[in-house]
Amino acid sequence: EDQNEFDDIAKACAKVFRRHKLFGEYYAYHNFIRANLRSKDQGVTGFGRTKQTALGGYIAGKVQGQVGVRAERVRAYLREVDNNDGQVIAIVKAGSAGTGGGGIATVGGRADDTILHEWGHAFARLSDEYTVFTGHRGEARNSVNISTSKDPLKAPWAHFVRAGVPGVGAYRGGAGRIKGVWRPTASGCAMANGNRFCPVCREAFILRIHE
């Protein structure tokens, strides 16, 4: 029953990309390969319980219950999958919030908006644009869609500002912080709390797709 549920989620995942405004335009650039794994236990490790699962699923963030997997296990299984390019969406049977980075987007169950958000981390190397603290550590740094300068002309997306793209500037907050960082748009980006990507994030995706 779990394998059948995974199959349904995997098929639905491809539909999320096909229906999305950005990914739908580039849908022909994507190939989806489903890889079924079998675990001894159901669920993820965390909150005082240990689960033996194929990808070592665990609770990654106690604040919102994000789930993660062990990257080394993902890579080990990926070596058995022909014609892969190292990009993975890992579906685990727990929760709905996820994590992403290094080519791996982890999602608990079926959560379409979470898939899009974590794919932004995993594939396009995007940062969070929300301000709610969820465990971000260390000093803030510049990324594709986060700036440590309030001057929009010093931001990584300064070329959008110079071109006068509507809505793109420097808005305080991002990367899980209220102060000290700025994001390119006020609201609505999938890297914050929406399901569409802002112009800066769209460009990052398109460049990565062509790369």
Image (cartoon, rainbow, N blue to C red):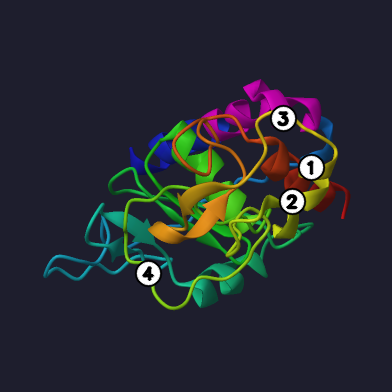
Rendered residue at 44%/40% (across/down)? 6
Task: Magenta stretch: give its range.
Answer: 12-27
Rendered residue at 51%/72% (across/down)? 71
Quarter holding residue 79: bottom right
Residue 16 forms part of the magenta stretch: yes
* Contact, mark 1 vs mark 2 (Cβ under 8 Å): yes
Considering only order in the chain, which callout, 4 or 2, is on the residue closer to the N terminus?
4
Task: Tell me where residue 199 appears, x and y as whole percent.
Answer: 71, 36
Image quadrant containing the C terminus: bottom right
Q: Which residue is mark 3?
A: 22
Q: Where 196 sits versus 52, above or below?
A: above
Q: Which residue is mark 1?
A: 160
Report how far apart the C-alphas of labels 3 and 1 lie in the structure.
18 Å
Q: Secondary structure at mark 2?
A: loop
Q: Where 166 sits versus 32, above or below?
A: above
Q: Residue furthest right?
A: 210
Q: Where 22 sits versus 138, above or below?
A: above
Task: Tell me where residue 201 appears, x and y as whole percent.
Answer: 68, 44
Whether residue 106 sits left or right of residue 41 in the image: it is right
Nearest to the observer: residue 26 or residue 37 = 26
Q: Which residue is mark 2?
A: 157
Considering only order in the chain, which callout, 3 or 4, is on the residue closer to the N terminus?
3
Rendered residue at 64%/35% (across/down)? 198
Q: Nearer the viewer, mark 4 or mark 3?
A: 3
Amino acid, disc 4: Gly
Report how far apart the C-alphas of labels 1 and 4 lie in the structure.
41 Å
Considering only order in the chain, which callout, 1 or 3, is on the residue closer to the N terminus?
3
Nearest to the observer: residue 80 or residue 89 = 89
